[in-house]
Image (cartoon, helix red, strand yellow):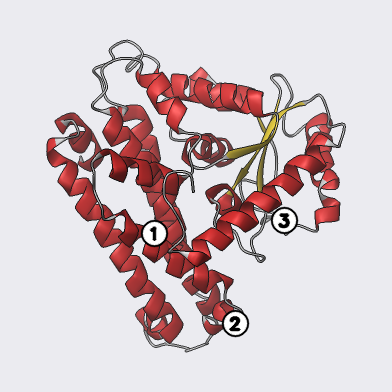
């Protein structure tokens, strides 16, 4: 991690090294393939983007098509399939077929000004757009990826921050909160009938999903202090992983408690890397109450870790009460 030494966090260091190696394999495989000209860029999300991947991590790709190419068209489907064909030799675990990574998205959809402020938007498009700002890393077409990321930032700045640099990222903040809370609903209720899957997804929500949320949220808080070049300020920092963003912000304020966050993440990644951990969550309790599924020992231990993680994030955020703009906290909370 470029913003924080990992010498005291061996699981994070191992995951960082593994992720870097796997990303090189993916970028090399795509670079060696004559991909369709219909593709603008390819980004990777999930644990590989956060540099916390293990051998069991899947590969979440966002394939972006050029303007005018429909994701539902034969050309779009063919281009998407070609990306996965190029990676076949790596034997990567593909994402779920019903999620946002199951099909490509077009650059036209991501930047469409007609969807500004629209809640009823294609969830694949909305999810892909917000992930560009939360955690995506480029694996093909890096220059186009960076340009697209900046264009998404400008889209969120239009008619507000772009007009008055003293304004806050209220539109982006609203979308960020909406995305995160939607994920919380999904992870909380989406697998109630499946004890093992519910526990695993719940722990991911309390660690990784929370991490990518606050990684962008706290950047928006820090951005509230800037009064000029707001878009550039934000875009320049989106190249960092979520953990790097937090490490940089802790360093900015001379706050020595980032080690608490790193320790919590280290324990989470260590657990996810331990053979048998996922299976230990699969105990079937047939509970009288849904809350009884939390009594699983492996889950309970890691939930305590998540509580410590959340508590430290809350402390840091509240400590910024006199640093970040009042308006930021108002828009965030209300």
Q: Earlier in the sequence, mark 2 or mark 3?
A: 3
State whether residue 29 is above or below residue 57.
above
Labels 2 & 3 near each other (Cβ < 8 A): no
Give residue 30's quadrant in the image. top right
> Is residue 202 in sight in this rendering?
no
Q: Observer-nearest residue: 327 or 124?
A: 327
- Give me the residue at 57% from left, 51% from top: 46
Position in image of residue 127 (x %, y %) = 53, 41
Q: Which residue is mark 1?
A: 262
Callouts 1 and 3 close, C-beta under 8 Å:
no
Dot 1, how many residues are within 10 Å of its Cα: few (below 14), some (14-19), or many (20+)? many
Could you tell whether 209 is left or right of 80 in the image?
A: left
Nearer the observer: mark 1 or 3; the answer is 1
Figure check: 254 above or below 159 = below
Mark 1 vs mark 2, CA separation in Å: 23 Å
Q: Quadrant of the C terminus?
A: top left
Where does label 2 land, which residue?
276
Q: Counting other residues with Cα less than 10 Å from the Cα at mark 3, is it few (<14), some (14-19), or many (20 or more)?
A: some
C-alpha span from label 1 to label 3: 28 Å
Place of residue 58 in the rendered image (x, y in percent of width and height, measured from the top left) = 66, 58
Q: Which of the two marks, 2 or 3, is nearer to us in this view?
A: 2
Tell me if residue 318 can be seen: yes
| Residue beneath disc 3 | 94
Answer yes or no: do the residues labelled 1 and 2 have beta carbons within 8 Å? no
């Amino acid at each position: 991690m470029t913003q924080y030494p990992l010498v005291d966090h061996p699981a994070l260091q191992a995951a960082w090294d593994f992720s870097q190696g796997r990303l090189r394999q993916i970028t090399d495989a795509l670079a060696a393939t004559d991909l369709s000209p219909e593709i603008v860029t390819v980004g990777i999300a999930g644990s590989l983007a956060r540099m916390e991947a293990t051998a069991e991590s899947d590969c979440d790709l966002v394939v972006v098509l050029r303007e005018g190419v429909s994701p539902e068209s034969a050309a779009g489907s063919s281009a998407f399939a070609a990306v996965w064909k190029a990676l076949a030799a790596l034997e990567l675990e593909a994402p779920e077929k019903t999620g946002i990574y199951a099909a490509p998205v077009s650059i036209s959809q991501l930047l469409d000004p007609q969807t500004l402020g629209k809640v009823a938007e294609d969830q694949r498009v909305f999810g892909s757009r917000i992930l560009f700002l939360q955690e995506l890393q480029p694996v093909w077409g890096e220059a186009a990826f960076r340009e697209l990321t900046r264009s998404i930032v400008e889209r969120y700045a239009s008619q507000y921050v772009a007009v008055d640099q003293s304004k806050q990222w209220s539109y982006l903040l609203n979308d960020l909160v909406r995305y995160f809370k939607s994920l919380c609903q999904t992870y909380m209720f989406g697998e109630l009938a499946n004890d093992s899957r519910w526990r695993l997804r719940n722990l991911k929500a309390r660690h990784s999903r929370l991490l990518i949320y606050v990684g962008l949220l706290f950047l928006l808080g820090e951005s509230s202090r800037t009064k000029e070049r707001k878009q550039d300020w934000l875009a320049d920092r989106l190249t960092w992983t979520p953990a790097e963003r937090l490490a940089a912000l802790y360093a900015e304020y001379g706050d020595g408690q980032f080690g608490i966050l790193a320790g919590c993440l280290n324990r989470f990644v260590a657990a996810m890397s331990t053979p048998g951990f996922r299976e230990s969550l699969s105990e079937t309790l047939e509970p009288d109450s849904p809350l009884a599924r939390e009594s699983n020992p492996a889950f309970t231990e890691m939930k305590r870790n998540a509580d410590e993680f959340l508590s430290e994030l809350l402390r840091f955020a509240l400590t910024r009460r006199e640093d970040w703009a009042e308006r930021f906290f108002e828009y965030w909370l209300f």
